[in-house]
Amino acid sequence: MSEKKNREEEISEQQEAAQPAECAEQTPAEEAESAAPQPDPELEKAKKEAAEYKDKWIRSVAEFENFRKRNAETRHTSYMEGRADVLLKVFPVGDNLERALLTCDENTKKGIEMVLRSFKALLEGEGIEEINPVGEEFDPQLCEAIMSEPAAEGVEPGYVKEVFLKGYKRGDKVLRFAQVKVTT
């Protein structure tokens, strides 16, 4: 009997030894899962906060860049409008020079023409164009109708017949509207 007990104990020990061996046999994925440390909640929280701060930083940089561009554009626009205000005060000088050409003698006319060429070169250097729409269709975006006249035979109504005061524009912006007579 003692031999039987010994034999049972041996079998029992073998089975116990075999069980952990069977459990120890795991796939590499299972081993990696069990071997990998569990994520630290504080570390995950810190990573989220870092991502939020990075996002806020990127947005702040973008906002500042947009502000800088808007500010530069505003300064440029203000500067150009200031220059336009000064030029508005100079336009009557050109008008008077052109009127003077109509009533002066030959020697004076040459001098006035030289000054008028300088005046026109100044305007051209500033990118300013004259608005002189004689014979063109009336455009309220460029002209101001101060008189009207019935259209003659064969002439369509709505065309500029005469310009009393030249207009000026820089690019698409009208600095002074041309004052005109329009056929009706």
Image (spheres, rainbow, N blue to C red):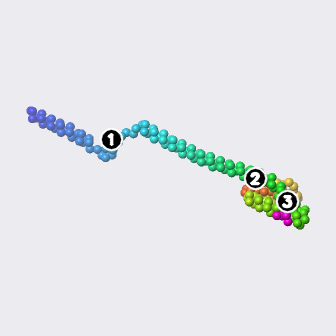
The residue labelled by disc 1 is: 34
Question: Which of disc 3 and disc 1 is earlier in sequence?
Answer: 1
Q: Nearer the viewer, residue 138 or 184?
A: 138
The residue labelled by disc 3 is: 97
Question: Which of disc 1 and disc 2 is earlier in sequence?
Answer: 1
> What amino acid is at disc 1?
Ser
| 22 horizontally vs 183: left or right | left
Q: Nearer the viewer, residue 24 or 170?
A: 170
Question: Percent from the top left, x then y, of residue 106?
Answer: 89, 67
Dot 1: within a 10 Å radius of its alpha carbon, few (fewer than 14), some, or many (20 or more) residues? few
Q: Main SS type for the magenta part?
A: helix
Q: Nearer the viewer, residue 142 or 118?
A: 118
> Marks 3 and 2, Cα distance to the nearest angstrom?
20 Å
Q: Is residue 111 magenta?
A: yes
Question: Which of disc 2 and disc 3 is earlier in sequence?
Answer: 2
> What amino acid is at disc 2?
Ala
The residue labelled by disc 2 is: 84
Q: Quadrant of residue 130?
A: bottom right
Highlighted magenta segment, given as a residue range: 110-114
| 106 horizontally vs 21: left or right | right
Residue in view at x 78 percent, y 54 percent = 87
